[in-house]
Structures are given as structure tokens and as C-alpha cells.
Amino acid sequence: MGLISGMLMGIVFGIALMAGWKHMMRYRSNKRIAKAVDIKSLSSLNRDDLKKICGENFPEWISFPVFEQVKWLNKQLSKLWPFVADAAEAIIKESVEPLLEEYRTPGITSIKFSKLSLGTVAPKIEGIRVQSLKKGQITMDIDLRWGGNPNIILAIEAALVASIPIQLKDLKVFTVVRAIFQLAEEIPCISAVVVALLAEPKPRIDYTLKAIGGSLTAIPGLSDMIDDTVHSIITDMLQWPHRIVVPIGGMPVDTSELELKPQGKLTVAVVRANNLKNKELIGKSDPYVVVYIRPLFKVKTKVIENNLNPVWNQTFELIVEDKETQSLILEVFDQDVGQDERLGVAKLPMIELEAEISKEIELRLLPSLDMLKIKDKKDRGTLTIQVLYHEFNKEEQLAALEEEKRILEERKKLKEAGVIGSTMDALDGAASLVGSGVGLVGSGLGAGAGIVGSGLGAFGSGLSKAGKFMGRTITGQSNASKRSGSSTPVNSVQENGGAKPL
Amino acid sequence: MGFFSTILGFCGFGVGVSTGLVIGYYLFIYFQPSDVKDPVIRPLVEHDSQSLQQLLPEIPLWVKNPDYDRIDWLNKFLELMWPYLDKAICKTAKNIAKPIIAEQIPKYKIESVEFEELTLGSLPPTFQGMKVFVTEEKELIMEPSLKWAGNPNVTLGVKAFGLKATVQAVDLQIFAQPRITLKPLVPSFPCFAKIFVSLMEKPHVDFGLKLFGADLMSIPGLYMFVQELIKDQVANMYLWPKTLEVEILDPTKAMMRPVGIVHVKVLRAMKLRKKDLLGGSDPYVKLKITESKAPSKKTTVKHKNLNPEWNEEFSIVVKDPESQALEFIVYDWEQVGKHDKMGMNVVPLKELTPNEPKVMTLDLLKNLNQNDAQDDKFRGQLVVELTYKPFKEGDTSKDLDNPLQKAPEGTPPSGGVLVVIVHEAQDVEGKHHTNPYVRIIFNGEERKTKHVKKNRDPRWDEEFTFVLEEPPLKEKLHVEVLSTSTRIGLLHPKETLGYVNISLADVVNNKRINEKYHLIDSKNGKIQIELQWRTSS
């Protein structure tokens, strides 16, 4: 009896114990999960949530801007700045100098930093926004403002003038930096970072240039040249959709997805302009049009003299990298002795275009692209163009990429060969800057032959077409000088010479 | 009989309990699912007031305290990255654990241990606010409030004696408030040399540990005990002021401290190429060390001489003999206008053997560009003697962490050395010009810093020392910020931007003081001065 009742009691007790344990388990588990849920739901609050939690006692010091404020980071940054500045100076010197070399215009033989100090004022991060626009990528936008007091002295050497130190002062940078992190499943979990400046709002980089012990006018158009160099570095390298891709973590990753690739081809026919403004005292303007998507690859029509309603009917092909954000820019200039004057500019966002449909568009010319700066509503005439957008397939894309690489390579070679460094080139390089007095090119010969994009020869595949992109520095001098490579753009100039208004 | 049946009863109870436990185990626990489900998270708007009430204790610090900043962007970043981090961490953890397990198991007669499941769950850690502290020292201090209430699932399958057991850890929760200090700050990326981490409070740790599916942690009392044990263990190691130190850069290298001196003797030059149209050139040599902000040094000018002899000596401080190089540039002096460059050359310091004089004859080049076509011309030669003397080992790296040094030998026993480091000033403003420099007057001795041009927030970081016979208990230090006009003019040549008198008794007592002082006769000017009192004992 005792045994059985003992056993029964034991079983009941044992089961009860287990049941109790299980109950306890469930209780504790639920408690933990509830806490986890609470913490998760509190991890990102918005205004309404907070209002609901706090009710009447809403803390006034809290706000919810689109770009989240990072006061703590700014505090740390200002403390850290002297050290960051020191470290950055060395890196900038190393990495930017070759860049300057690449982008320098022909009038100048070398640009170097003779002094580089980033000053004592730390940049301020106005806000940070994190979003995920694409799976596997994190997009971080940093609203950066820097009104610093850096002291940057550039030693610029032009062929005719000895080294002139040029001081860059009052640098102000207001921009939104976009960093895209490509995620990976290996530590450190980020395989590459893409850095770019957001185009909207447009990056604002202000500075003043001051020549030390001399005047900026010593070389004609020098300040324009520097402006242009800086401008093209920014717009062509950094401004979205252009980007810098930095692989991280030392593992071999395929970053080609992230790199900017030719996406399509835009065929632009500059047909005519109407009612252009007359800028000249005697006679009428001598208009020509500069067409580009990337400032690095500019093309230009012939000059039609003494005409306010010129008809060009010239066709160009341009590469499109990002149809969604890039725009076609058309600038109409009046060719003049010395500085060419801009008659107006027009912009065509390519997102409006449909693929494979040819379209004639009449664009109104504006005094400037910056809508905030336009105050006069005067009519500057119109520009009629015909556009056709063609989207590349894989092979075409690769071909275009190769072509682009080849051109840049060639350009570099030409530069290295000292072509651009020669006195002759320096002369017109200095006098005729990108998009301005191209008239002097080719020893004042045909006026306005060739192209704007410094030294850039042929581009795209349609080499045979007339009025293609011709290297400005090459035009007119190709015969005289030593270079006559078989595959260089020089030849293409000669081949197409007939079609060109040389 | 009664006795016998009681014994039997106890025996039966014993058997019964074990049977009951087994039945209970199979009834209640064995069939419990062992996988971890993702918890359902409802948006806050759907919560009723009661469940909101429950949330209140967990309200993030940035809501409660104005001195905590919200770092939602970091949370969001972490959340987006979490699936990748999870996989990466688990993979690494598995790889690390495998050899360790393989090494350990033979000792315990266990056949195999392997991860049946290893994931960190879907819930990422969150930062509930970030607080930073700003001090006068060269350090960054931040205190994030870290809360990780995750749903990880770590299941270990252990096989031993033919039996298989599973150990499962679930629902790990860690709440901690670490203090992260980055110091010392150095002028090379990432701009700090070490990371110090310590916990400001005992962390909260909670988890479930399931053995055969039964959560051991829910045995009453055991959880408390284990949690206390963990807390104490962690606290013993990392509770402030104990810290975990992680070295990022070698501070000696990163600080770019001088490691030696190179003695340069510019002997002579030969066959310099003529630059002046009339007469010979007037050469002088400018020498400079690369990657340094120190001003370059010049020899005297030898007029009308294409084979000048200088025999002049210079000493240059070296910070990194591996990468630095000496640059010699021969210039042609001119009365008016720009001095022409006659040629140059560079000697990398790694070519020198320490403590051994080396005479070098350098061909002068136009520039350093190797493939410059115009470079072939002979521009003359320069003869120099170089001796690199590195500092003795230990001289350099001592007291890097401890800014308080001992007084050098030869100071009087009762006295010591007063070190004044002028760091920086803020908001100094002159009426007519602001080119500030600092003048220190102590015991009639006057010292000056260099001028900083047109700057309202100048930074000097200059150090001055005064050797004293006895502690300056009653003396005061007069620190004055002045500005001189850059233009040569009779109007306002000099201006006082503010001054402050610092009594030195505190320094003697505290050995070291690093503070910002408000300047007298200045609107909001402040100056940061570090004072040290070094004694020989």
C-alpha cells in the first residue's frame, strides 16, 4: 500500500514539478520576449509615437528633422579636427595632386600644392539620413557644411610665366554627401563604399583666388581656368551620378556593379537657334553651341558668323551614364576676340526622353542654370534640337566603356608627350579656355574648329560623322608638330578635316 | 509493519518522483518547439494605454535626458546591416570555435560537439541615446546606451558516451552603458591611437539556457545566482575605472615624435650653371626635410661664385627616418625679383647609416621628375656631409601615456620645473587686427609664442619651461594675448587682446592642471593653458 501510494504521490509530485517548471519557463520566456519587443519598438520613434507615450509632457528639446541632427558627432569632430586636418592634409596632397594633373587645362604645365592647411574650423554635419533604396545597400546622406579657413597655396606653372603661387581662400563647402555601403556576408560586412555628392541640392563650393606677389591677370583667363578645373573635377568625378568607389575589407569584390557605366547613347542634332541676343557692337553675334552631358566630354558646333538665327544642323553623339539624373546642357556662345561671351544656356533633363523615339524640342535659353540666380525674364531666344536616346545592350556598353577608357588614356599620353606643354599650346590654352575663346586655336586660322573638351579626340563609335569631337589642342597644329600617331585623334582630325570648318 | 510500509512509501515516492519527472518532461517539455520564432512587433500606434504603461520603463534615454542625443540613423544602419552582420559573425564564430572544440573534447571524453544552429536572430542591438563629454584633454569620451534584446538561437549538440544532448541558449539580453574613450588623439588616420572601453554600471544580462529542451534558468533562484555571477565577473574586469584597452595604432609612430636628428654640413658646390646674364650667379642652398612643417634652412649667399664653399652646419629633427628625405635646392640670389632655382636633389634618410658621417656628392637636377626630357643638362654638383643620430631607445617612448614627467637631472632638490603649455585660445578679437600671440611673464622672465595670422581661434601648442629653486606657492603667472599689425604702420602697431593671472599654488599641489581661463579685458575670450610642476622626486 505504502509503496503504491508513495509511487502515486511521487508521480503526481514529479509531474507537478515539471508542470511548474514549464510554467516558469514559459513565464520567463514570455517576459524576455515582451522586453525584446518593447525595446525593438522603442528603437526608432517618430513624433506621433513619442506624443502617444509622453502625452502632455512632450519633451521640447526633441525634434524630428528629415536629416537627423548629430550634435554629439559635431562636438567630437571639432575636438578631433586639428588631428583630422593634419592627417587629411597628407592624404589630400598625395591623392589630389595627380588628379589636378589629369584635369589641368593645356595652358598650364603643372599644378602643385605648395601649402595646404585645412585651417582650424571643423566641418559641421548638419544631419544624417539613412535609408535603404536597394536591397543589400545602405544609403547614407550626410549634410555637410564647411565654412572653414583653410590656407591652400597652389603653385601653378604656365609655360610662359614662371611659377605663380595662387592662394585659395574663404573656401565654403555646402553639400550633401551620399555614401552607399554595399553589404557583404563577411566581416566587416561592407564590401565597398560609393561616395558622391548629391546633385540635388547642388553642391555649393565657394572660394576666392588670390595671387601672391602678382596678379591673376598675368595669365589670361587663369582664374576661369581654375574655376573650370575645379568645376569639372566636382561635376565630373563627384557629383551624382558620378561617384568614387572604394573597395573595403581587402577581399576581392566585384565593384563593377557600383561603377558608373555607359547606359545609353544620346544623339543630339543641334538644328538652329532663333532670336539670339546681339552682344556685339559692330555686326551681329557669331554664335556656336557647346553641348555636353559630362563637362569632361564637351562637343561644339561650328561658328556661324554674323547671324542671330543660325542654322547648324550638326549631329553629335553623347554617352549617357544615368538617364534618371543626368541632363543635357547646351550653351550658346558668341565667338569673340578674347573671351567668348555666353548668350544663353539650356538644360534638358534626360529623364523626359523616351528611348528610341526621335523628338524635336525647342528649348528656351536662360542666362544661367541656377534658377535662384535668374532675375531678368528677358527673352534670350530659343534653341531647337533633335534628340534620340538609344539604350545600350551589354556589348555596346562594354564597347563604349572601352572607348571611353581609350580616349582618356590617349589624352593622358598626349599630355605626357609634352604636346600640351609646348609654348604654342600654352598660348592658346591660356587664351582660349574651355568653352571660351576657341578662336585662337590653330593659330587663329579657321576659328572655332575642333572642340572644347581639352585635347579630347574622337569619342563614341561614330567617328566618321562630320563635326565630331576633335581635340582643340590638336587642331591646326597636328601637321606642324612631331606627333602623328596612327591611332591618335590627330589622324581622325585629318581624315575628317574636310567636313570640318577648318 | 508501519515502519516497513513507510520505508516502502518513501522508496515508492522516490521512484514515483523520477517517473513523474520523466512523464512530466515528455508531457510538457519534450514536445515544446525548440526553434526560436521572430517576435511580432506591432507599431506603437496600435498599443493601448495599458501596454504603453508597460513600455515606460524602457523609454530611451534620449527622450528622458536632453544631454543624450538620438542616434536613430545608427540604429537604422545597424538594422539594415544586421542580417549580414549576423551571418558574418556566426560564420566567424563557427570557424574560431571549431579548432578550440577539437582541441578540448578529447580531455573530457566527449565524442563531438557541434553547432546545430547558430544565429543571432532578427533583432539588432539598439542604441538608446549617445552622450559625449568634452574635456580639455586630448581625448574623446562617449557613452552610448546599448540595449540588445535579441532572439539568438545557439544550439550545441554534444555527444558523449553514446548519448546526445543539446544545449540551447536563447533570448539573450544585454543592456550596458559602456564608456568609450578614444585617446590619445594623433595626426594620422583614424586619428586616435587607443580605444578604452569600460562599463559605467553593472550590465544587465538575461538569457535562457535549455538542456534537453528544459530551461535551466527558470529554476527559481538559479537565474538570480547565475546573473549575479556574470555581473560580478564582468564588473570585476570592466567596471569603471577598470578598462579594456584596444590598441589601434602604435602611439609612438602615430604621434610623429622626433626620433633623431640629422646633422647636415653643406660643404660646397661645383661647376654650377650660370643663371645671371652678367657676372656669375650668387648661389645659396635651401634645405628642408619632407613631410615636416618646420621652416627650411638656408646657407649664406656666396656672391659671384659658381664653385662656392659654404661649410655650414645645420641640425634637423627627424620624425620618421623610413619615409622622410632631405631636400636640397640651390638658388641664385637676386637683388630684385624672384630667386632662380639652379638645381635640386633629394636624399632619402634611409640611405644613411645611423651615427656614421657620410659625404655625398649630389648631381643637381631640374626637378625630381625622372622622365623629364630637359633634365639631361649638367647643372653642377653639391657636396654635403650627413650624419643621422637617432635618439637612444627609451628616450622617445617614455611617458607617452603619462603626461607628467619628472624633472630632468640637475634641478635643485627642493625645486622643480614649471612647464607651461599654451594650447589654444577662443574668441580673441582685436579692435584693429587679430594676429594673436601669447606672452608669458613669470618672475620677470618673458616668453613668447609664435604669431598666428588673422585668427580668432588660434592654436599654438607651444611649451615653455622654467627651472625654479623652490615651489612657486605664492607666485603668479601672467599670460597675455597680444596682436601685432601685419602692416607696417604707425597706427595701432600692437594691441592687447586680453590677459589672465594664474596663481601657481594649485599647480604645485595638483602637479598638473589643464584648464580654460577666461581672459580679462576681452569680450568672451578664453585661453587653454596646461601647467605642470615637475619635481625630481
Image (tube, helix red, strand yellow):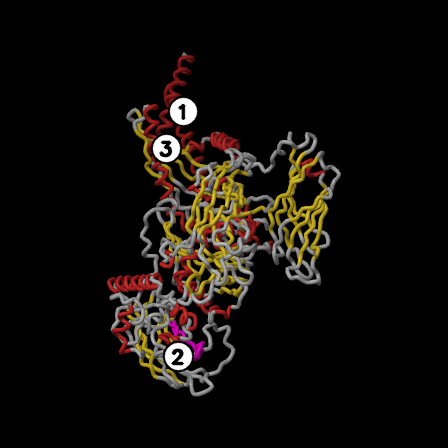
Magenta stretch, main secondary structure class: strand
Q: Which residue is mark 2?
A: A363
Q: Is residue A307 visible?
A: yes
Q: CA distance from mark 2 to mark 1?
A: 96 Å
Q: Is residue A1 visible?
A: no
Going from N to C along the chain, the mark reached first, 2 or 1, is 1
Residue nearest the observer in this picture, A269 or B434:
B434
Q: Which residue is mark 3?
A: B167
> Which callout, 2 or 1, points to the residue nearer the camera?
2
Question: In the rendered structure, which amino acid carries the disc numbered 1?
Answer: Met
The answer to whether marks 2 and 1 sit on the same chain is: yes
Residue A285 locus on image (x, y percent): 42, 84
Residue A474 locus on image (x, y percent): 33, 70
Determine the chain carrying the residue at label 1.
A
Question: In the rendered structure, which amino acid carries the disc numbered 2?
Answer: Leu
Question: Which range is magenta?
Answer: A328-350
Q: Quadrant of the C terminus of chain B?
A: top right
Specify the label residue A9 is tagged with.
Answer: 1
Residue for point 35% across, 49% down: A184
Label 3: element kind:
strand
Question: In the rendered structure, which amino acid carries the disc numbered 3?
Answer: Val
* Callout 3 touching callout 1 (CB < 8 Å): no
Determine the chain carrying the residue at label 2.
A
Residue nearest the observer in this picture, B350 or A501:
B350
Number of numbered discs overlaid on the protein picture: 3
Label 1: element kind:
helix
The answer to whether marks 2 and 3 sit on the same chain is: no
